[in-house]
Image (tube, rainbow, N blue to C red):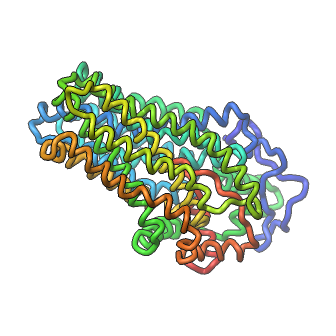
Amino acid sequence: MWPFGSQSPRAPATLEGAGTADDPYLVDWELNDPCNPLSMRPALKWFVSAINAAATLVLAFGSSVYVSSVADLENRFGVAPETALLGASLYVVGFAVGPLLWAPLGELLGRRVVFVTAYGGFFACSVVAALADNLPLIIATRAIGGALGSVAMVNAGSVVGDMFSPAERGRVSAIFSSAPFFGPVLGPIVGGFLSQTAGWRGIGILIAALTGVLWLLYCAVVPETYSPVLLRIRAEALTRADVDGSLFRSRIDHKNGPKTLSQSLRVALMRPLVMLVSEAIVIVLSTYMAILYGALYLLFAAFPVIFQQNYRLPAGISGLAFLGIAVGVLLAVVYMFFQNTKYVKIAKASPGGKAPPEARLLPARLGAVAAPLGLFAFAITNTPPIPFYVPAAVTVPFGFGIVVIFLSLLNYLLDTYTIYAASAMATSTVVRSIFGAVFPLFARALFQKLGPQFGAAVPATLAAICVPFPFLFYRYGSKIREKSRLSQEARTILSQMGGKTEKKRPFSEGHGPTEQDELDNCKNSGSG
């Protein structure tokens, strides 16, 4: 079935080419083409974006709501807390592994088929984890499910880029970018109450139910939105329908030549590794984001120790302590919504209508100060007789800071590495997912050995050490970029391609230049 209704593929009155193998008819979007994702009705665009954002939110929600069931799992299976926490840590490790596969597969097969297959697998793993009666099976299915479900992280931002024009993407992204951050914060709030009444199995059933509903909704409503795949489908249909045996090819495929999965995977896997050891910009900023991400997941494991053991609060009430971070996340989304308008003005006033990458770092300077401020305030106030709502409230700056920093720095990587930005973002995803997986494993020991105040001061100190980074890159970023081999290489390739300097879409989790963009430009430049 054709993606957006009953329109069947048809050839325009005139097409470039001769219809032969050497010179096929070139298929592209027509003006106001009803099958072009950019021509979708605005209401449908927002609905599709909301489904993708919800899928990402539920994936992230599953990483933290599980932590609320750790005590119940300890009692049920007689294991140490660190063993039970593996179900959360390995789930987050999947966030690092999965996107490296789903991104190139999506470029070859289309976003819809890859999402339906992988997220369906995530749903199946969630069902098994909810019904299992032994801990190794629960941990294993959650680890596999995290890798499968991470397709949502790749899909959500990419689909927004498929459907919205550059002028529309900024505000849409600012709204839907909160999903990867808001999901983990909601987990302990919901899980705290649910674990009291339904235990670990009830939490597992909730995750399975949410993923199942979203998977079915996606299957029923969301069409393919990736233009290269849609045009390939149209060209193949026109070739089959042509009585003269003429050959049709999409203009994109004709320009780029044949591509294979192995080529796409080579780009997806190798360049992030190269960046991780050779690109100072990627190393420093990825480490910074990883520390903050690790601190967030450390709090998921530390809050039960502080609020349940020290404050003697029931699990449900202690989960409400995360409302402070949740408020901070919402404030950050509003702030970045308006910052995007400011950035557009800077871009319009810049030579060529394109702002330098360092303009992306303006909000990060505020976020860099806010994040450690919130963590230090939490460290100072997290013991009785100070009321429990005080340490919960002072985490607002941390929630605000982490979102502002992430969106600013990831947009900076996007603008710095242009055609190679997907690899830079993949590197960042791998590093921060590892930190998010490891930090909770030593959280309990850290807080029990150092106490709640000094324990919380550790991530606060790490965040404070990183405060200068956005300021230094804002001041000296242009000089640092001049010494970056891949940044300069990307700039050279763009120049060789005719000076194309299209504005890149603002980042949301999974957003940025596609792996196919990278592969195509590698081919054009003769590099790998």
Residue plotted at (50% across, 39% down) = 178
The answer to which image quadrant residue 175 occupies is: top right
Residue plotted at (75% across, 41% down) = 39
**In the drawing, does residue 499 fall left or right of residue 151?**
right
Q: Nearer the viewer, residue 238 or 415?
A: 415
Q: Can residue 109 be seen in this view?
A: no
Q: Which of 527 and 294 is in front in this view?
A: 294
Placement of 112 over or under 471, stated as above or below: above
**In the drawing, does residue 204 fall left or right of residue 121?**
left
Residue plotted at (78% across, 56% down) = 28
**In the drawing, does residue 240 fall left or right of residue 426?**
right
Expressed as whole percent of the image width and height from the top left, the position of residue 141 reads 29, 43
Expressed as whole percent of the image width and height from the top left, the position of residue 341 reads 68, 44
Residue found at the very far left of the displayed protein:
78
The answer to which image quadrant residue 133 occupies is: top left
- In the picture, which quadrant includes the N terminus? top right
Residue plotted at (55% across, 61% down) = 474
Q: Which of 48 and 216 is in front in this view?
A: 48
